[in-house]
């Protein structure tokens, strides 16, 4: 039975690491004033189930190796196996540490990130040491203490193991008994207990509190479950509760999205596959340039009413364009933002192009491909190395032809920041020269990076804010990226392409730590459409999100091409609707309200305009939220967003 004890020691140390992680998570991110002690204790107990399940899966390779016939009885082999388990324990602890630091940026534990940042290990390591030196020191001390304690415990048990004088027969019987005990225990723990159904995500949220649900989970469990979901193609499972009839969901949701006065639906089986009623000869072949600005948050943009104007050039430019006062990012990660902007599909339930099996297999014709068919050149420009953050796969699937990265810009004299890639000024000016050389209409997405932690700046003169100012380094990076925009526009104004270009400047998502506890500020980013020759300046107050940009651009270009979109043109007279990812939940945005939703229904409600509203209106919004989510998931899972090849009717 010594191996059973050995297995339990390995299990115990993993649980210690997971418990320490949860304890730090609680003290780092909890608001104790809004939580009951009873619920906190219950969340920790629920978390223990997830920890036991996680540990059981992690120990599978160790458990198998413990019972290899003949060699597993040798003391030297068991020592090597103990060393391997110590390495495994160290890696698990480091991964949990990364998850702790990652959480405030996205309000979710690590999931898809492990599979999309394989090429970005060194930048992440550099950021870790530069930004979290004290935390890294604490991690090293914790791992050292754990390693010493583990070594002492293993040495003691192996010493007893080697000193017994049992016969070979008795040892074999002991091996069989230990194998049965360990196997049975592993299966029970992996399933989360003796209940009829295995442990699942929803069990973490039994207390109906998003934070306590996140407290019960851990980053290793969510990563493993994500991998399983990706393998089994189970995105969005659980959103099957019927809050209204299928026909009612269809009618209610289509009315929120489609303007039947200005748009045609050629095939009722594809309710969002539609086109504007422009004639083919009305199309305007204007260039389109979308600046996606890393971590730009409305809280620090003067044009958005921010408490600090760290983007003075942008704020001045906004007076001459279409500026959106209530614009929200359908994203908490950059790849979600880019996917939502180009595909016009909100990333609910992991609906991110290049990451979602359901979305990747959809027969979609997204905006870049529509424009390519009209003779446009298409570009994606990003100053990071090629393939960073999985953007290469994403760009390839959107239909964009040319991917321009750090390697290309370095050849033209771009300056490397030493962490992520090229400074924004050099990336933007490279883009300007690229556009000058075009003789055909073009569509381009330019993704900035200088306002990403660790906020590297090219010169001391860009340190506008001093260390005593909270988030001064982030604010300095905003000011610098705003300066980089001004350099681009100064260079572009007198060129042949400028007057025939529609420019969009939009934040990808907010900067997690600096936006505070306000739910609306968590998603509020600036957005400006600028084309003085073609679009009159106006301030738009309706709800607008990333998924509205593609249909808005088609409206501006007066395109009659059929497209599918969960967004609508920002120039359609309606209150607007948004669906935002919120960790493992969604936020339904409409008429000044934000409704936090789970598969079981609405969990919280917030009014970001500060207006009071009667119960009747709130009840209506809850019904609309249920219908919208049902419509969204039905349409995606039934693959009825775009007609299959050969079925297009327009």
Image (cartoon, rainbow, N blue to C red):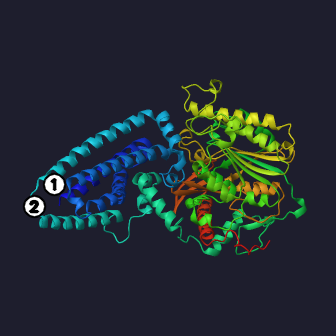
Question: Which residue does the image show at 61% across and 33% down from the upper left?
Answer: 475
Q: Which label was assigned to residue 251?
A: none
Image coordinates of residue 607 in percent, x first then y, are: 60, 50
Query: Closest to the observer: 175 or 453?
Result: 175
Residue at 60% from the left image edge and 59% from the top image edge: 354
Q: Quadrant of residue 460?
A: top right
Q: Is residue 228 visible?
A: yes
CA gap between label 1 and label 2 equals 10 Å
Mark 1 burial class by Cα count in 10 Å: few <14, some 14-19, many 20+: some
Residue located at (59% from left, 72% from top): 244
Choose between 27 and 479: the one closer to the eye.
479
Is residue 290 rendered to the left or right of residue 49?
right
The residue nearer to you, when weighing 524 against 362, is 362
**Quadrant position of the C terminus in the picture:** bottom right
Which class describes the residues within 10 Å of circle 2: few (<14), some (14-19), or many (20+)?
few
Q: Residue furthest right?
A: 281
Which label belongs to residue 166? Answer: 2
> Mark 1 or mark 2: which comes first in sequence?
1
Q: Is residue 565 left or right of residue 120?
A: right
Using the image, tell me which numbered label, if any, was put on residue 161: 1
> Looking at the picture, how far across and down is residue 391, in whole percent?
62, 51
Q: Is residue 474 above or below residue 505?
A: above
From the viewer's side, name the closer residue of 256 and 336.
336
Q: Can the viewer see residue 302?
A: no
Q: How many marks?
A: 2
Which quadrant: the N terminus? bottom left
Q: Position of residue 611 (x, y in %)?
A: 63, 49
């Amino acid at each position: 039975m010594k191996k059973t004890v050995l297995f339990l020691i390995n299990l115990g140390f993993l649980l210690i690491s997971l418990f320490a992680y949860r304890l730090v998570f609680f003290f780092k991110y909890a608001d104790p004033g809004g939580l009951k002690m009873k619920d906190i204790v219950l969340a920790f107990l629920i978390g223990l189930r997830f920890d036991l399940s996680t540990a059981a899966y992690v120990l599978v390779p160790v458990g198998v190796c413990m019972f290899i016939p003949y060699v597993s009885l040798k003391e030297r082999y068991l020592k090597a196996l103990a060393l391997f388990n110590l390495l495994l324990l160290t890696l698990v602890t480091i991964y949990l540490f990364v998850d702790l630091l990652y959480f405030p940026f996205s309000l979710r534990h690590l999931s898809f990130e492990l599979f999309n940042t394989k090429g970005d290990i060194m930048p992440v390591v550099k950021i870790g040491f530069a930004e979290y030196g004290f935390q890294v020191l604490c991690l090293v001390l914790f791992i050292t203490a754990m390693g010493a304690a583990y070594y002492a415990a293993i040495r003691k048990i192996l010493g007893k193991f080697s000193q017994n004088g049992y016969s070979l027969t008795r040892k074999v019987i002991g091996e069989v008994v230990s194998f049965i005990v360990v196997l049975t225990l592993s299966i029970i723990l992996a399933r989360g207990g003796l209940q009829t159904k295995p442990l699942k995500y929803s069990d973490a949220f039994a207390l109906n509190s998003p934070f306590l649900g996140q407290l019960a989970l851990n980053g290793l469990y969510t990563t493993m479950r994500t991998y399983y979901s990706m393998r089994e193609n189970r995105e969005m499972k659980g959103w099957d509760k019927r809050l209204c009839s299928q026909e009612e969901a269809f009618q209610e949701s289509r009315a929120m999205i489609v303007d039947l006065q200005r748009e045609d639906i050629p095939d009722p089986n594809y309710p969002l596959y539609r086109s504007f009623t422009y004639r083919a000869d009305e199309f305007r072949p204007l260039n389109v340039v979308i600046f996606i600005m890393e971590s730009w948050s409305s809280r620090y943009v003067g044009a958005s009413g921010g408490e600090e104007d760290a983007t003075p050039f942008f704020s001045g430019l906004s007076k001459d364009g279409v500026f959106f006062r209530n614009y929200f990012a359908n994203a908490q990660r950059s790849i979600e933002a880019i996917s939502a902007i180009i595909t016009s599909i909100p990333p609910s339930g992991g609906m991110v192009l290049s990451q979602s099996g359901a979305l990747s297999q959809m027969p979609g014709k997204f905006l870049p491909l529509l424009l390519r068919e009209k003779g446009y050149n298409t570009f994606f420009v990003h100053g990071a190395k090629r393939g960073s953050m999985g953007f290469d796969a994403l760009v390839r699937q959107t239909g964009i032809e040319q991917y321009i990265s750090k390697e290309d810009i370095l050849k033209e004299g771009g300056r490397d920041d030493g962490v992520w890639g090229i400074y924004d000024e050099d990336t933007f000016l490279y883009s300007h020269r690229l556009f000058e050389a075009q003789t055909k209409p073009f569509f381009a997405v330019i993704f900035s990076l200088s306002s990403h932690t660790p906020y590297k700046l090219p010169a001391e003169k860009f340190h506008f804010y001093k260390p005593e100012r909270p988030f001064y380094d982030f604010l300095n990076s905003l000011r610098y990226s705003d300066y980089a925009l001004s350099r681009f526009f100064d260079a572009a104004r007198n060129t042949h392409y400028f007057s025939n270009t529609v420019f969009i400047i939009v934040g990808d998502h907010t900067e997690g730590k600096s936006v505070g506890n306000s739910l609306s500020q968590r998603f509020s980013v600036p957005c400006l459409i600028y084309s003085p020759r073609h679009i009159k300046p106006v301030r738009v107050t309706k709800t607008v999100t990333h998924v509205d940009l593609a249909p808005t651009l088609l409206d501006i270009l007066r395109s009659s091409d059929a497209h599918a979109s969960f967004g609508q043109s920002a120039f359609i007279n309606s209150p607007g609707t948004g669906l935002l990812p919120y960790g493992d939940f969604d936020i339904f945005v409409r008429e000044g309200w934000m409704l936090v939703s789970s598969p079981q229904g609405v969990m919280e409600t917030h009014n970001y305009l500060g207006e009071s509203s009667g119960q009747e209106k709130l009840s209506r919004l809850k019904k609309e939220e249920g219908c919208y989510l049902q419509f969204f998931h039905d349409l995606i899972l039934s693959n009825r967003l775009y007609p299959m090849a050969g079925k297009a009717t327009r």
